[in-house]
Amino acid sequence: MLSSISKVSARQFSSTASSAYKVAIAGAAGGIGQPLSLLMKLNHKVTDLALYDLRNAPGVAADVSHVPTNSTVKGYGPEDDGLAQAFSNADVVIIPAGVPRKPGMTRDDLFNTNASIVRDLAKAVAEYAPNAAICVISNPVNSTVPIVAEVLKSKGTYNPKKLFGVTTLDVLRSSRFLSEVVGTDPNHEPVTVVGGHSGITIVPLLSQTNHKDLPKDKYDALVHRIQFGGDEVVQAKNGAGSATLSMAQAGARFASSVLNGLAGEADVVEPTFVDSPLFKAEGVEFFSSPVTLGTEGVKKIHALGSLSSAEEEMVATAKETLIKNIAKGVEFVKANP
Ligand SMILES: NC(=O)C1=CN([C@@H]2O[C@H](COP(=O)(O)OP(=O)(O)OC[C@H]3O[C@@H](n4cnc5c(N)ncnc54)[C@H](O)[C@@H]3O)[C@@H](O)[C@H]2O)C=CC1
Ligand SMILES: O=C([O-])CC(=O)C(=O)O
């Protein structure tokens, strides 16, 4: 029997439903964008792949287009209404556009540059692809997702069921790092990760795995590694950027799950950062938890389930930070519409 992770991986490239989708990627020539474009080219549900970037998207498109799957690939730059052409009629828009971290920076340090990039791309989605499911990769995700929501609200096209912050890399890392600690196959170690996508807002629910009794030192080190896994890559790349290849796999898995949901497949569940009722009463407008994906986007937002006391504490801390990160995004759009 396939484990849940294997099932998700097997479905990433499959075409079980009769479906034909246009996927647009903004930032397609970047470190994430290029391998993500390749992985989306391998997805048989994608029939039209539109690659947009400020530079070099036509080159990436020409390259990827030689892969023999049943889709057309076109690359667009900002000239000749390229953004309109790339986004128009897209079913899914994936946004990895923006600058990555260098050593010593937090994701929040990217806000000043990436906020306006994401705001402007959100305006284009509102205009050219108002029905698209939007997958936001650009950091800081805890703020860029509220930025997109705020722009879409101002344009009257906000659909909370179709806006997703991509937190899948935290899920992949959790499986991998847990399997390293316990000496198992990561394919058999699904881990639910909730909260947000930065440091202490990343909360892995290890008490819901088969390894809830890890010794405290191992547990603490594992949680820290999951929360700060991004830093490991930033430091190893030593100024040349952050995670790109593992992020491309995470982004492709998430976007493929969105497509599987749109195609009507059953039981497609991924943790993702969405407009969520879970802690709205406490002022937390967006929160990541497992979400069932369906034909209209979000079908069901799942509650967190039972938590250990350590997890309860981490969720409480995450909520405090998230409230601030979300407000920062909302205020940015209000001040800079
Ligand atoms: N959500 C997550 O888990 C993760 C998010 N990230 C974030 O993804 C973003 C991209 O990272 P990389 O691909 O490594 O960066 P990169 O610098 O290699 O690529 C970014 C691309 O975006 C393009 N770009 C910039 N402004 C644009 C605009 N207005 N329209 C279209 N394209 C534009 C650039 O030309 C470049 O090709 C960063 O913000 C990074 O922090 C990275 C890893 C994981
Ligand atoms: O660490 C970063 O800046 C990139 C990122 O979000 C990750 O790798 O999780």
Image (spheres, grey):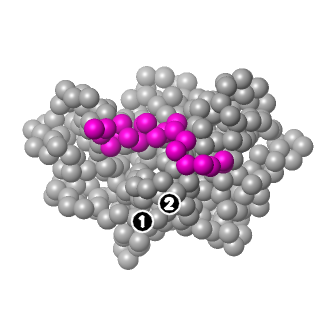
Work out whether 280 lies above or below 187.
below
Asked if residue 68 lies left or right of residue 261, the reply is right
**Rendered image quadrant of residue 169:** top left
Query: Which segment did they paint magenta?
Result: 1-21
Mark 2 near mark 1, Cβ–Cβ under 8 Å?
Answer: yes
Q: Which residue is labeled 2 in the image?
A: 294
Image point (43%, 36%), residue name: 10
Image point (41%, 33%), residue name: 231
Q: Marks 2 and 1, Cα distance to the nearest angstrom?
A: 8 Å
For label 1, the crowd category at 10 Å Cα-Cα, with few meaning under 14, some 14 to 19 and many 20 or more, is few
Please provide percent x and percent y for residue 166. 49, 48
How many numbered callouts?
2
Q: For residue 300, which numbered disc appears in the image? A: 1
Q: Can residue 55 be seen in this view?
A: no
Q: Give the amino acid at mark 2.
A: Gly
Give the structural element (helix, strand or loop) at label 1. strand
For label 2, the crowd category at 10 Å Cα-Cα, with few meaning under 14, some 14 to 19 and many 20 or more, is many
Give the structural element (helix, strand or loop) at label 2. strand
